[in-house]
Image (tube, helix red, strand yellow):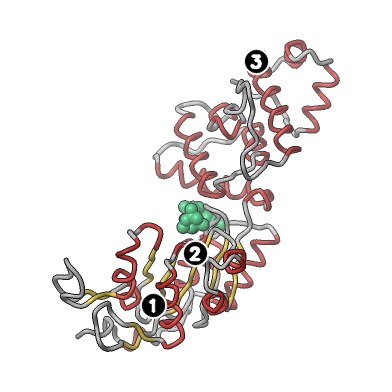
Amino acid sequence: MPGATEMPVATAMMICDTGFESFRSEIVGESAPIRQLFDTLERVAPLMSTVLIQGETGTGKELVARTIHQNSPRRGFPFVAFNAAAIPEGLVEAELFGHVKGAFTGAISDRIGRFEMANRGTLFIDEVSTMPAPLQAKLLRALQEREVERVGASRTIKIDTRVIAASNVDLLSLVKKGDFREDLYYRLNVVRVKLPALRERRLDIPVLVRHFLAQSFARNAVPPRPLSAAALDALVAYDWPGNIRQLENAVEHAVVMSGRSADIQASMLPDEVLGRLSMGTPAMTVPAEGLNFASFITGVERDLILQCLKRTGGNKRQAALLLQLSRTTLIDKLHRLGIGDAPAA
Ligand SMILES: Nc1ncnc2c1ncn2[C@@H]1O[C@H](COP(=O)(O)OP(=O)(O)OP(=O)(O)O)[C@@H](O)[C@H]1O
Ligand SMILES: [Mg+2]
């Protein structure tokens, strides 16, 4: 049967009955943007509408797409992820739409594409901005007509696939430059979900850290230990260009580095989080995308102070001497930077 995968109708009729509590257990956060995200997801998940998820790398685009699928009546059917950027350009069409035997060299049998695999379920098209122009046209047709044509085939196949697309670049600016089809943009952008960068919702950092610490303790089968105030402070202060994925990895790094120590200390965090990578670099260069001057300087201050406190075993007078600051200036800075007790190690 060249058509889509057959699934029992009873499963297709299955209605989401778990409520939306599962959003809250998987997508961690309490900040205003995240509460707004929950509201949008509750409204959007049960529908058929196409969703466009935009956000920087590591902000949770795929997690959100899966969550939408899991909370939709489609959850008994496949969630199929597709990333055009990860596939050689010449293979994208056959991968997405399938092909018939003999359609091109190497097409030794009929093969269904991701669109058909996701029939009655959800197709997640990641990095949609990288779709080659001819494919953008074909994708638009598939969305509008609700049918696909396998490469080399002479007939079309009806599909019932919900599409969720994601992009880490602003698609509208690509449309304006003529690099992305405007009609496809509007067809994808029926509902838009904008995921904020982690530095725009620092309020969520402590709760995310707690979540990832618990996961990391369990995964590494190590006893749970508290995080020092200075470590949490450094985590909250950092700018997280890699967003939640980078935070997750930083927490894992610290847990692994903590070995048998009684708590998890700032010194166990990755170098970049502590700003150590930029230290000692004779010619500091501003990255192409620029930087937040105030938070960069705060990061440098924090790093220098933490280093000296560490070296002096937490003795503020000696640390102040090393930094050629008065003791009161150092204490003022500690307050301002929210550094409570000096790190023990
Ligand atoms: N709000 C959140 N709560 C808990 N974990 C999260 C949250 N957002 C993202 N994560 C986790 O962060 C990691 C990165 O998320 P995900 O892969 O969905 O990001 P992405 O936006 O698709 O990244 P990329 O653009 O690099 O593909 C995953 O391990 C995911 O589970
Ligand atoms: Mg992703």
Instruction: Classify mark 3: helix, strand or loop.
Output: loop
Q: Which residue is mark 2?
A: 129
Q: Nearer the viewer, mark 1 or mark 3?
A: 1
Q: Is residue 73 above or below residue 323?
A: below
Sort mark 3 into few (<14), some (14-19) or many (20+) by Cα contacts within 10 Å: some
Q: Residue at x 52, y 73 (%)?
A: 181
Residue sitting nearer the eye, 155 or 125: 155
Q: Amino acid at mark 2?
A: Ser
Q: Position of residue 141 (x, y in %)?
A: 43, 83
Residue sitting nearer the eye, 82 or 109: 109
Q: Residue at x 70, y 35 (%)?
A: 296
Q: Earlier in the sequence, mark 1 or mark 3?
A: 1
Q: Which residue is mark 1?
A: 121
Q: Which residue is mark 3?
A: 313
Q: Amino acid at mark 3?
A: Gly
Quadrant assignment, res 232: top right
Q: Position of residue 122 (x, y in %)?
A: 41, 75
Number of the label disc, if any, that sits on residue 219: none
